[in-house]
Amino acid sequence: MGIFSRKNSETATAPAPVNPDLAALTGDYTIDPSHTTLGFVARHAMVTNVKGSFQEFTGTLHLDGSAPSNSTATLDVEMASIETGSADRDGHLKSADFFKVEEFPKMTFRSTKTEALGGDDYRITGDLTILGTTKPLTIDLEFNGAATDPFGNERVGFEGKAEILRSEWGLTWNAALETGGVLVSDKIKLNFDISAIKNA
């Protein structure tokens, strides 16, 4: 996406303007798990939403405030740390029907492209690996701001969202409902609330 301008009777695309406040934030950051949420939402029984999150993960950000396209991100998630508010459901998700956590203990994301969309909006694309299958994932991000916390840490915050079809990663278990439809939706909504600390 970009800003469109008319020149010599032709339409040209210019890069989205860089937020000048981000230039000073250039550097390497570590995602803070205690202030970060990696969440998801699935449709259950065709009538309601089940929300969950992962409690254990590590991640890094490299931010280039002057040239956002040079920014990168990595994420490694412990699949056994999944929580949905139901121990029985969590156990089923960890089982061979879903995440097979003993065989595939981690879910990973490695960015391949970062775009500035203008203002505080960004888009990051990368490789998401689940159950040994790697597919592209695009996440829309909003920069929430930067601050120095009471302990002297320089922090940045981003909020993001994405959608996937779980079947594309081999997550195909389901059960038919007597009234029609299936127990678990194929479409999963992903939500990210990220706080990261600048490395010393």
Image (cartoon, rainbow, N blue to C red):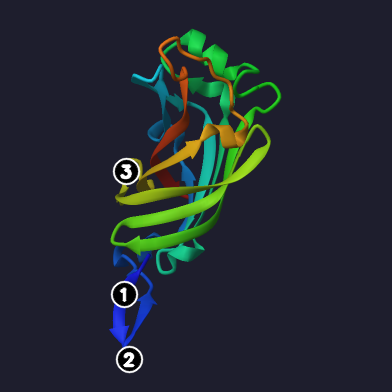
What residue lies at 55% left-to-right and 12% top-to-bottom?
91
**Distance of mark 1 from mark 2, alpha carbons?**
13 Å
Assign a secondary structure to mark 3. loop
Q: Residues within 10 Å of mark 1 (few under 14, many from 20)?
A: few
Q: From the viewer's perspective, tell me whether residue 39 is left or right of residue 175.
A: left
Identified by mark 3, the residue type is Asp
- The residue where tag 3 is placed is 149
Q: How crowded is mark 2: few (under 14 residues within 10 Å), some or many (20 or more)?
A: few
Identified by mark 1, the residue type is Phe
Identified by mark 2, the residue type is Asn
Q: From the viewer's perspective, tell me whether residue 19 is left or right of residue 186.
A: left
Assign a secondary structure to mark 2. loop
Q: Give the camera-side residue of 71 and 175.
A: 175
- The residue where tag 1 is placed is 4
Residue 160: x and y, percent? Answer: 38, 44
- The residue where tag 2 is placed is 8
The answer, for residue 26, to whether it is visible in the render is: no
Residue 19: x and y, percent? Answer: 31, 65
Q: How crowded is mark 3: few (under 14 residues within 10 Å), some or many (20 or more)?
A: few
